Amino acid sequence: MSKILIYCDGGLGNRYNALISGISAAELFNCRPDIYWPVNNWCEAEYSDIFGNNVQIHTSNLIDLKKDAPSWLVLSHDLRNAEYLGVPFLSAYGFSTEAEFTDFCLKDGRDVFLYPALILPWISQERLRTVARGLPFHPDLVAAADKFVKESFSGEFYGLHLRRTDLVLGYSDAEVKEIILEHKDRQFFVCSDSEESEKAAAQYSNVRVRNKMSYVERQDEKKNWSDITLDTSKRAYHSNVRRNAQGVRDALVDLLILSQSIIVGKSASTFMNVARFIKELSTNKVGNLPEIYTIPIEESFNKASAGVLDVMQAISAAQQLWSKQRYHQAVELLRLWLKQPNSTLLYVVFFNLSVYLQNLGALHEAEAYLRQCVYQQPDFLQGHLQLGLLLEKLKRPDEAITHLLKALSITRKGTEQDNNFRMMIIANLSRLTQETSH
């Protein structure tokens, strides 16, 4: 192996992830990487528009590299791009450690073509942060972000990012309104790839939005944002976007402002996650503003429908809905998630759903979910306890006793929580035993 080629493609967040990951990987071999920063519909801004360091950059698009790809060890983001290049799919994320990656590359011997879109998880955080700190953004864009913060906020502020074009991520406009009105005494920065969403937020006195010169555009004005469209390399995507150079520069200023805020919420947005990463690089992390813990509900439903909603976000979003007395939506979300379950914590979803249904009076349906819960996790104490109490409500005391005895056998002596469970279970067993003996 003589060199590492880093291919930075996609939007600004994806390119930043690929860049710092690739430079970090090249450090493992003490070699200078060949950086590819293509100008295409995903990002028409050149490398020098974004960063302040002067390095040699290749601007070839993927279509220009197809003929050379078979001679490289290609480690890519997904199967689609491996097939496009005509090479076997080897995941850029498929290593456990830096040593495993270097051994694999050295044994192969070919030049490495590294094409990720996310930060590579096997690279140490310390190495990534060191590389990122040595990669300055363009000073004019940094100055623009600092000027906006200084002129717009008197102290700490919250940040909200809303993606609205080919992907809809983050809070809905209605959820943004709810968050802002619940915290009228706090300052907010709102940024989006949608001018309409920014205008909707800007009407509130505690919100600041930066006036941008350009937003994301459609490649084909006759198509919707998510219609299948060919990109510059003739790849078909459900993404009808064009990000011109000024729009990308404006987006970077937004990202730098966002990185100085207390970012609200978590989502699959690469843009937001890069802002969090840059924020962590700051030496001044101490803040007095409390976190705002709220889950994007509309996004949660969309991701649940697609089968990609994280189980903990599903549970948290349902709990949030329940706490706001949106009871039936909480049940609907968990039912939707269960259509495409993808977690070893399936039993927790069954349990939570059963509790909600009991509170809504749907006892027989709650029983069905509790039985699935204890089938999935036979030693789940709370599952057997709740099933026993529910069966008592359903006038089936013998079955109730069976599950309460199972719950009792699972408790551990000596722990305060389990001692409390034991006392509760024993009291219920005693009462049930007496009632069934008469």
Image: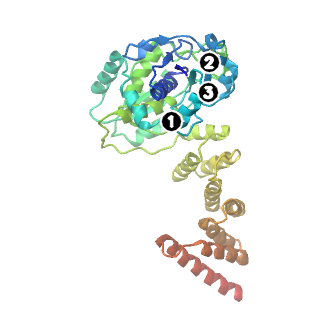
Q: Is mark 2 on a helix, strand or loop?
A: loop
First along the sequence among labels 1 and 3: 1
Pointer 2 with pointer 3, Cβ within 8 A: no
Q: Position of residue 49 (x, y in %)?
A: 42, 13
Q: What residue type is disc 1 on?
A: Glu
Q: Within the image, what quadrant is residue 9 found in?
A: top right
Q: Nearer the viewer, residue 158 or 6?
A: 6
Q: What residue type is disc 2 on?
A: Asn
Q: Position of residue 67 (x, y in %)?
A: 66, 12
- Where is mark 3, residue-wise? 108
- Where is mark 1, residue-wise? 98
In this view, 342 is above or below 193: below
Residue at the location (53% across, 30% down)? 118
Residue 219 shown left or right of residue 369 in the figure: left
Q: Residues within 10 Å of mark 2 (few under 14, many from 20)?
A: many
Of discs 1 and 3, which sits in the foreground? 3
Of discs 1 and 2, which sits in the foreground? 1
Q: Residues within 10 Å of mark 1 (few under 14, many from 20)?
A: some
- Where is mark 2, residue-wise? 240
First along the sequence among labels 2 and 3: 3
**Image quadrant for the C terminus?**
bottom right
Residue at the location (70% across, 71% down)? 394
Q: What residue type is disc 3 on?
A: Asp
